[in-house]
């Protein structure tokens, strides 16, 4: 999602409180069961504090929020409970976890790096944005231990475990970008790089930037018009640890990156789609690492794009096959996928965050679509993707376009967990023969942008 303040200013979209009326009318396929919802709690329940991404550790789910983050106990998926909330404002508070550490992205200028900071009056050399690190060894009382400033903030980030002599560290790949019409000092074009932070696991206070690899030395996609964004950084990275690959969603470009040398990743393939893709947003590999799904966030998450006028190939997913070996690998477009239901003109709807449903022998993804709800779709046949299940609420408002709906939908240890920007945390159960083997897969922790081998 583009920065909230920017989108509200540019798009004329209203932020409203959730609750009441038709928005509680759930439409679902027969193979979906809605097990639970736990609403956002004060003070992280204001219209301008939407819920964002999710990370998982043991029997806990951690949900980001523009105002901080929330820890939920999900030991009983039918009855999740709130454990604690940490107030730490800073868009968009993307979260991830490893061991006893939690990472939190800040992508707007703040007065300082504390959790008591105020918004910067104007972007300048004295404002702060970047990465915050918390100790969650006592998960009911997270403790802020360190911060690392990055030149363009941290819109999202991806954890990459160290290996070899760096096995005692984790790398944080920070994605950030410049938006046309903004004037952030550290983000001015050409901002054609990512930032890599190295974090010693036994000394998180020693975290520091170790590299800023340039991904587009020849310049990225120049963009065009008011819809197609030029490449001035990356929105998100997803890594497949079994293949030492990353898929970079970089505004105007989709890239495949070799990460075998953690501090020196290099691009091995790139792709542009000037007809259908406006903003390369995120990516998901299949389990074998021979396919990758890229998403297009047409309209930045605050536009009604799931309708007949926009059509089935814009604001959608694109399924690519990964062909070849080594640095000769290429991305080959196979198909597009978009939810098969038209939404109303007051529902923001576009392809957003999701993960694999780890079913044996199939490539199945669960995915959030804002007010388009949650879609479970099969891309085993990459040229003929199709939906197999869905979950959707009615529009938040019948008269105006408002920010709402599912931000992220991830499969974790047998269930789907959804952060709804306004409604809080939903828990969904998929009851389908095509996904039944996925219930045997277990992770001790799960960061959806860090794809791990499955353990059964």
Image: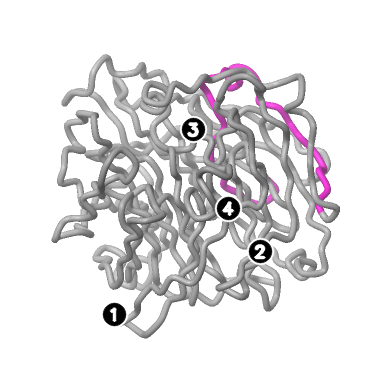
Could you give the CA–CA distance between mark 4 and mark 3, rounded to whole angstroms? 18 Å
Bounds of the magenta segment: 32-60
Which mark's residue is nearer the viewer, 1 or 2? Answer: 2
Q: Residues within 10 Å of mark 1 (few under 14, many from 20)?
A: few
Residue 419 seen from this side: no
Q: Nearer the viewer, residue 455 or 168?
A: 455
Please tell me the numbered disc located at residue 302: 3
Q: Which of the labelled discs sits on residue 354, or is there none? A: 4
Q: Secondary structure at mark 4?
A: strand
The label shown at residue 38 is: none
Which residue is at 28% across, 72% downward?
268
Marks 2 and 3 in Cβ contact (< 8 Å): no
Residue at mark 1 to residue at mark 2: CA–CA distance: 32 Å
Badge 2 density bin: few <14, some 14–19, many ≥20, Cα 10 Å: many
Q: Earlier in the sequence, mark 4 or mark 3?
A: 3
Pick the quarter of the image with the C terminus: bottom right
Separation of marks 2 and 4 at Cα, in angstroms = 15 Å
Q: Earlier in the sequence, mark 2 or mark 3?
A: 3
Picture coordinates of residue 162, whole percent (x, y): 38, 64
């Amino acid at each position: 999602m583009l920065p909230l303040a920017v989108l509200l200013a540019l798009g004329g979209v209203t932020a409203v409180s959730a609750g009441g009326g038709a928005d509680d009318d759930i439409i679902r396929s027969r193979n979906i069961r809605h097990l639970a919802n736990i609403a956002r709690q004060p003070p992280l329940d204001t219209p301008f504090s939407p819920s964002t991404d999710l990370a998982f550790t043991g029997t806990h789910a951690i949900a980001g929020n523009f105002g901080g983050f929330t820890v939920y106990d999900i030991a009983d998926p039918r009855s999740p409970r709130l454990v604690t909330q940490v107030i730490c404002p800073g868009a968009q508070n993307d979260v991830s976890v490893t061991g006893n550490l939690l990472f939190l992205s800040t992508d707007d200028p703040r007065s300082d790096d504390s959790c008591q900071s105020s918004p910067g009056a104007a972007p300048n050399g004295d404002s702060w944005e970047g990465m915050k690190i918390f100790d969650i060894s006592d998960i009911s009382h997270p403790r802020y231990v360190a911060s690392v400033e990055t030149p363009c903030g941290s819109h999202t980030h991806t954890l990459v475990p160290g290996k070899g002599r760096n096995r005692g560290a984790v790398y944080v790949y920070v994605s950030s970008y410049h938006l046309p019409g903004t004037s952030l000092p550290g983000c001015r074009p050409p901002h054609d790089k990512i930032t890599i932070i190295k974090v010693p696991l036994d000394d998180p206070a020693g975290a520091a930037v170790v590299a800023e690899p340039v991904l587009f030395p020849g310049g990225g996609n120049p963009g065009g018009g008011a819809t197609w964004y030029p490449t001035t950084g990356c929105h998100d990275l997803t890594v497949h640890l079994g293949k030492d690959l990353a898929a970079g969603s970089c505004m105007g470009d989709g890239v495949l990156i070799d990460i075998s040398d953690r501090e020196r990743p290099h691009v091995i393939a790139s792709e542009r789609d000037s007809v259908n893709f406006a903003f390369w947003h995120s990516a998901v590999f299949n389990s074998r690492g021979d396919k990758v799904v890229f998403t297009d966030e047409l309209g930045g998450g605050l536009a009604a794009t799931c309708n007949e006028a926009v059509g089935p190939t814009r604001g959608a997913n694109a399924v690519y096959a990964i062909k070849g070996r080594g640095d000769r690998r290429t991305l080959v477009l196979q198909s597009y996928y978009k939810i098969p239901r038209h939404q109303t003109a007051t529902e923001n709807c576009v392809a957003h965050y999701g993960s694999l449903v780890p079913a044996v022998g199939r490539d199945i993804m669960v995915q959030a679509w804002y007010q388009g709800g949650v879609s479970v779709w099969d891309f085993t046949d990459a040229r003929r993707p199709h939906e197999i299940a869905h979950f959707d609420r009615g529009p938040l408002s019948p008269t105006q376009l408002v920010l709402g709906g599912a931000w992220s939908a991830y499969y974790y240890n047998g269930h789907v967990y959804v952060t709804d920007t306004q409604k809080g945390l939903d828990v969904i159960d998929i009851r389908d023969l095509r996904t039944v083997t996925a219930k045997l897969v277990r992770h001790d922790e799960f960061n959806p942008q860090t794809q791990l081998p499955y353990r059964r």
